[in-house]
Image (tube, rainbow, N blue to C red):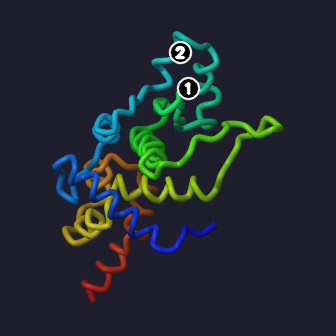
Amino acid sequence: MSLRHGFKAEANRLAMQVRAELGLHPTSPLAPALLAEHLAIPVETFSSAIAHDELVGRLLTTECEAVSAVTVHAGPRRAIWVNDSHDLGRQNSSAHHEIAHALLMHPPGPALDFRGCRHWDGEIEEEADWLAGNLLITNEAAWSIARRGTSPEEAMLQYGVSKPMLTWRMNMSGARARRVRSAS
């Protein structure tokens, strides 16, 4: 599946715009909790729901890979639930993915199809993935990481991302290629 023409640039502009609204520099890290609060979207963890539902406990233990995060809609309101059994980088990515759905005004859909299987709209999921990556690390931030020669470990810690996310953003932003060209 491919993103519609111009979406990648639009996603980076949107990530820069929300940083500006929050008074952050284009290269600043953006914690999902800060953006969610700005958008008035509550973010909860699965472990906080265990007392309410025994089945949620399974999502933190034996079924921990089944769900990373989910948005629950109640009319025009939404709340994000994040699986806190995952490492912090994945939690941040998952939360930003759900926030991306809100920023892109993706309509809520059914969780399951008529067969009881997970409903999946590849196009909107790909858009949310791309925007989430930009919310975590803008192109400008990736270029700054490359220009400064920041180690992957330091960048992962600074931006609260996993190594796969950092690698993906460095590649997709062109930062790695820019660094190689400038070193030549």
The residue where tag 1 is placed is 60
**In this picture, is 178 found above or below 106?**
below
Residue lying furthest top in this view? 51
Which element is circle 1 on? helix
Query: How would you rate the neighbour count of disc 2 (Cα within 10 Å): few for under 14, some for 14-19, many for 20 or more?
Result: some
Residue at the location (52% across, 35% down)?
71
Classed neighbour count for the residue bearing mark 1: other residues with Cα under 10 Å, few (<14), some (14–19), many (≥20): many
- Marks 2 and 1 sit apart, C-alpha to C-alpha, by 9 Å
Which callout, 2 or 1, points at the residue further toward the start of the chain?
2
Residue, x 33% and y 57% (percent of image)?
A: 15
Question: Across the whole image, how many numbered discs are drawn on residues?
Answer: 2
Residue at 44% x, 68% y is 8
Q: Which residue is mark 2?
A: 50
Image: 128 above or below 57:
below
- In the figure, is residue 125 to the left or right of 130? right
Q: From the viewer's side, name the closer residue of 50 and 25.
A: 25
What is the secondary structure assignment of the residue under circle 2?
loop
Side (left or right) of 114 relative to 5: right
x then y, percent, for residue 172: 43, 69
- Determine contact: label 2, label 1, CB under 8 Å: yes
* Disc 2 versus disc 1: nearer the observer: 2
Q: What's under tag 2, amino acid-wise? A: Ile
Figure quadrant of the N terminus: bottom right
Q: Quadrant of residue 64?
A: top right
